Amino acid sequence: MEKKRVRRAEINRCSWDPARGRWQISGQLRVEYDGYDGEEYAFTLEDGPDGYCIIDEFSGPIPESERYWLRRWARARKAQLFEDDYWR
């Protein structure tokens, strides 16, 4: 039987890098299985022309399936902020 996987991203910091002209998001991705703690990954994402990419993995390599989810989550969160006129 396959375990139910729940992912949560928590943001610690969102900052503008003036030298690179890009937003950076630092936080943790928490993955739980059947309600129990599984893995935790610390990361920094950077916004770019092709969407967000992971530029730092502080707690070791993030598996590709979790990297994919994290990039999709960041893109959806950014779209939500623009829809809600957060930046205006």
Image (cartoon, helix red, strand yellow):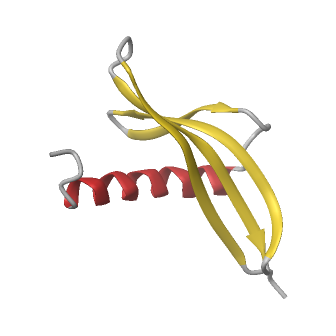
Residue drawn at point x = 55 percent, y = 53 percent: 70
Q: Position of residue 51 (x, y in %)?
A: 38, 41
Q: Front-most of 15 and 55?
A: 15
Residue drawn at point x = 38 percent, y = 59 percent: 76
Q: Is residue 23 above or below residue 37?
A: above
Residue 12 vs residue 61: left or right? left
Q: Is residue 13 above or below residue 4?
A: above
Residue 40 vs residue 55: left or right? right
Residue 3 vs residue 5: left or right? right
Q: Is residue 62 above or below residue 72?
A: above
Write down the quadrant of residue 37 in the picture. bottom right
Residue drawn at point x = 44 percent, y = 40 percent: 52
Residue drawn at point x = 58 percent, y = 53 percent: 10
On-image quarter of the N terminus: bottom right
Q: Position of residue 57 (x, y in %)?
A: 69, 34
**Residue that extends furthest to the left in the rendered view of this protein:** 88
Q: Position of residue 65 (x, y in %)?
A: 65, 57
Q: How many marks?
A: 0
**Residue that extends furthest to the top in the rendered view of this protein:** 19
Q: Front-most of 49 and 19?
A: 19
Q: Position of residue 22 (x, y in %)?
A: 36, 26
Write down the quadrant of residue 21 in the picture. top left
